[in-house]
Every structure is written in structure tokens, then in C-alpha cells.
Image (cartoon, rainbow, N blue to C red):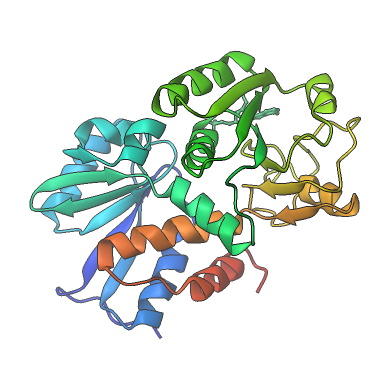
Amino acid sequence: MSQPITSKTALVGVMGWPLEHSLSPAMHNAAFAELGIDWAYLPLPVQPGAVEQALRGLMALNFVGTNVTVPHKQAVMRYMDELSDAAQITGAVNTVYIQDGKFIGSNTDPAGFLDSLREAGCHPRGMRVAVLGAGGAARAVVFALARAEADSVVVFNRTAQRAAFLVDDLADAFPDSRLSFEALTQKALAVLGSDVDLVVNTTSVGMYPHVDTCPWPEGVPIPANVLFYDLVYNPLETTFLARARAAGARAIDGLGMLVHQGALSLKMWTGHSAPVGVMRDACLRGLGIK
Ligand code: ATR
């Protein structure tokens, strides 16, 4: 049962544009109800160009903080008074905490990704990893893997130059990590063969409504002894993961990362350990699965 919102209710939310499909309000409000705390999480649709006004508004309205999603994760950075390492190095903020008139920006995506891997029984230390994609999500994943001391990370991207920039940026922060890049082509992935332990898709390929598309080229066999992880969670079973499972490989869907990055934001704002099972169920209901 959710509680009534009153003048005492602590407020947080998610800033993004558009926000119709965000699962975060349902996920966090379910967690607050489970914890029995007087908090509410609101969708905050903010048009591009209105980020500064929106942040000042949240401070004036005594919000405790906000999540930040597409397309504002970079735009909010310049208004932050403090930035966590993860936010600074990935160049993105997904969680703002408003404290004593200051905006504190962090990025819980990398640690959320690692928590979801560990929950699935995967410990990336010493692993050889291939990351598909070089956008914002890839930056969070490569940062997390480098910090967790993966043996090596190769970033494959359709636009190879973008992968080169990503590797270049993160190499400064992790001079001891083996980071490299390749064009995302049939040939490059075929050469990879089974010299890899974990493949992570961070591209939007396969996401609803383009559910029949797959970031792994049709002509390249899927090695059975490799773990495949898709950040896409709508649909939960992407064509990529279905192909991996059909080839006998283990596969992890993207819901774990959504839940765990949310759990870390919730902990930052409230101080409470998040009920991740309840949050996962709320997301599944939001996706029409449960
Ligand atoms: P996000 O912040 O979610 O990572 P993004 O920054 O827009 O989103 O990045 C999207 C990623 O998906 C990029 O790596 C993009 O490749 P390009 O850099 O070449 O654009 C990748 N991507 C999107 N559509 C793709 C497609 N049809 N084939 C291959 N890669 C695709």
C-alpha cells in the first residue's frame, strides 16, 4: 500500500525527456512502500534546454535529489557543485543529491552494472571482455570493468572513431588497464572467437520496437563457453540473448543493472538498503511480465 503524499513527504524523481516509458517511478515507489518510509518518486519531464531551471526548481521545492536520464546525463554536469569519480570519469550524472544548498552529482550506473554481474555469479576480475557499443552506457560499463580489474576490455563500435575516443578518455583514468577498440564488424568479432569470457551489449540494437535486430552479426558463431550480457531490458529476452542461449551460452538480461543502479541511488538519498527483489518485481509489472 502506498502512503498519502503530505507536506512532510520527502521527494525525489527522475528528470528526462521523454519519460513515458520510465520504470523508475514504479520501482522506487514500490521500494519506499516496502521500507515503510514517507518518500515519493515523481516523473519529471524536462525539455532539453530547461535543465538548469529544473535543477534550481527542485532545490527551491526541497527535493532531496533526482535521477537523471536521457538526454540530460551530460547536460546536468556543469551545474553540479561536486562530482563523484564515476561521474567525472564517465562524463555523466545519473543521480543528484541536494544537500545544504549544493548539487552533488554521481553516476550509479557502473556500480549498478557490477552489482548485477555479481548477483548473477559473475566476478569480472581477470576476465577478458568485449563491449559492443561506445555510447554513454558503454562508458559506464568500461569504467566499471576497468575499476573491477578485468584483464582486458575491447570496445567494438559501428563508428570506430567513437570507440577510439572512449578508450582514449578512460585510458587516462586507468593507465594500467588493457583497453582497446575495433570496428563492430563480422570480421572483427569472428577473429575474437572464444578468446573472451564476457560479451556485453550496450548498443540499443534489439530494443523495442526493433526486437528482431541483433548486435552480434548473423554470420559469426556464438561461443558456448562465453557469458553474454545485454543491457537492453525491453524486451527482457532479446534476440541477442535468445541466440546466445540457443548456442548453449549463459545469458544475463538488462533488468539487473536498472534495479541495482536504482538501489544505489535510493541508498544515497535515504540511507536505507534497497529491497531489490521488490524493485525487480515492480519493473516486471511495468513491463507487463508479472
Ligand atoms: P547510450 O547512452 O544508451 O549508450 P548512445 O550514446 O546513443 O546511447 O549510444 C548508442 C550506441 O548504440 C552507440 O554505440 C551506437 O553506435 P554508433 O556510435 O556507431 O552510433 C550503437 N548503435 C545504435 N544503433 C546501432 C545499429 N543499428 N547498429 C550498430 N550500432 C548501433
- Which residue corresponds to the image point at 53% horizontal and 71% vertical from the top-left? 282
Quarter containing the C terminus: bottom right
Q: Give the image location of residue 191, x and y in percent.
A: 83, 24
The outermost residue toward the bottom is 1
Q: Residue at x 88, y 33 (%)?
A: 218
- Is residue 240 visible in the rendered structure shown here? yes
What is the count of numbered marks?
0
Q: Using residue 84 as the reference point, say whether residue 239 is left or right of it.
A: right
Going 75% across and 50% down the picture, which residue do you hit? 238
Q: Where does the image place residue 213, in percent across and percent down from the top left? A: 78, 38
In front of the other: 26 or 243: 243
**What x and y, as percent, mark residue 151?**
61, 36
Q: Quadrant of residue 286?
A: bottom right
Residue 177 at x, y percent in the picture:
52, 29
Foreground pick, 93 / 163: 163
Quarter of image, ligand 1: top right
Name the residue located 39 percent from the left edge and 59 percent from the top edge: 264
Give the residue furthest to the left.
100
Q: Is residue 201 left or right of residue 3?
A: right
Pick the quarter of the image with the N terminus: bottom left
Q: Which residue is most to the top?
A: 161
Q: Residue 87: name its quadrant.
A: top left
State whether residue 21 appears in this view: no
Looking at the picture, tell me which residue is in the foreground, 114 or 6. Answer: 114
Q: Is residue 2 left or right of residue 6?
A: right
